[in-house]
Image (cartoon, rainbow, N blue to C red):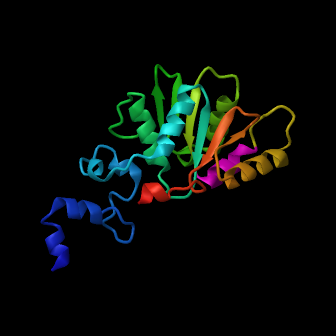
């Protein structure tokens, strides 16, 4: 049968494990891909990783947001790799260059108060540069709670919603952070 034949070829088994349509989905999330030798065979370089790497290298903090499965974590892993950070397993907080660069793998893994503190540091006068990966819900939930000059919560929520709807990277929090919603960017070339 097809199912038993696929287990004879470990690469076919690996490909089958990438779907979330069954219980055998151990490779359906990006964290499982890190360090998997088969992933290197199917990895497609993403130009968004180039863009994010350049922004961070030029001291611009970035928030990557988008839908589940858009590739946010894979892009973060690629950025870490380009900075020479060993990424065998992605931790929820990765510090690079003696802590000067901070990568937050998934804001959902932090408590609400921790998320607010992370965002507050990213938009503050911190000497550190941040790459924050967040689904849109977690970002909206805490993004309007940070202190930015005299801005009202409703003004911050509106700014976040507008930036998340943009078809290109958008500066938020008075230009202190660049928000990139990868679900809104053209990814046809990457898919092809």
Which residue lies at the image location 20% right of the left edge and 59% below the top edge? Answer: 11
Q: Quadrant of the C terminus?
A: bottom left
Image coords of residue 158 (percent x, y): 79, 51
Which residue lies at the image location 36% right of the left edge and 66% below the top edge? Answer: 19
**Residue 13, placed above or below residue 145:** below
User: Which residue range is magenta in the image?
Assistant: 135-144
Characterize the magenta stretch by its predominant secondary structure: helix
**Residue 123, placed above or below residue 142:** above
Q: Residue furthest bottom?
A: 1
Image coords of residue 5 (percent x, y): 14, 72
Image coords of residue 121 (percent x, y): 66, 29
- On screen, residue 125 versus residue 98, left or right, reads right
Q: Is residue 143 magenta?
A: yes
Which one is in front, 18 or 49? 49
Image coords of residue 99 (percent x, y): 50, 22
Which residue lies at the image location 36% right of the left edge and 36% below the top edge? Answer: 87
- On screen, residue 187 versus residue 116, left or right, reads left
Residue 156 shows in the view = yes
**Residue 188, placed above or below residue 84:** below
- On screen, residue 22 versus residue 179, left or right, reads left
Please tell me in which quadrant of the rendered image residue 89 appears.
top left
Please tell me in which quadrant of the rendered image residue 90 appears.
top left
- On screen, residue 106 versus residue 171, left or right, reads left
Q: Quadrant of the N terminus?
A: bottom left
Which residue lies at the image location 69% right of the left edge and 52% below the top edge? Answer: 166
Q: Is residue 173 magenta?
A: no
**Residue 42, placed above or below residue 174:** below
Residue 69 shows in the view = no
């Amino acid at each position: 049968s097809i199912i038993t034949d696929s287990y004879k070829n470990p690469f076919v088994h690996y490909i089958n494990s990438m779907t979330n349509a069954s219980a055998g989905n151990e490779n359906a999330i990006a964290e499982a891909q890190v360090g998997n030798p088969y992933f290197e065979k199917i990895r497609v370089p993403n130009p968004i990783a180039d863009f994010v790497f350049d922004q961070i290298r030029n001291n611009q903090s970035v928030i990557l947001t988008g839908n589940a499965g858009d590739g946010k974590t894979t892009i973060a892993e690629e950025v870490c790799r380009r900075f020479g950070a060993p990424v065998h397993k992605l931790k929820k907080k990765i510090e690079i260059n003696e802590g000067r660069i901070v990568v937050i793998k998934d804001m959902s893994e932090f408590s609400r108060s921790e998320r607010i503190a992370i965002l507050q540091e990213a938009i503050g006068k911190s000497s550190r540069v941040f790459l924050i990966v967040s689904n849109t819900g977690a970002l909206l939930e805490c993004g309007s709670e940070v202190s930015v000059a005299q801005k009202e919560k409703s003004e911050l929520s509106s700014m976040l919603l507008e930036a998340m709807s943009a078809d290109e990277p958008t500066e938020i929090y008075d230009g202190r952070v660049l928000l990139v919603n990868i679900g809104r960017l053209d990814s046809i070339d990457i898919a092809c």
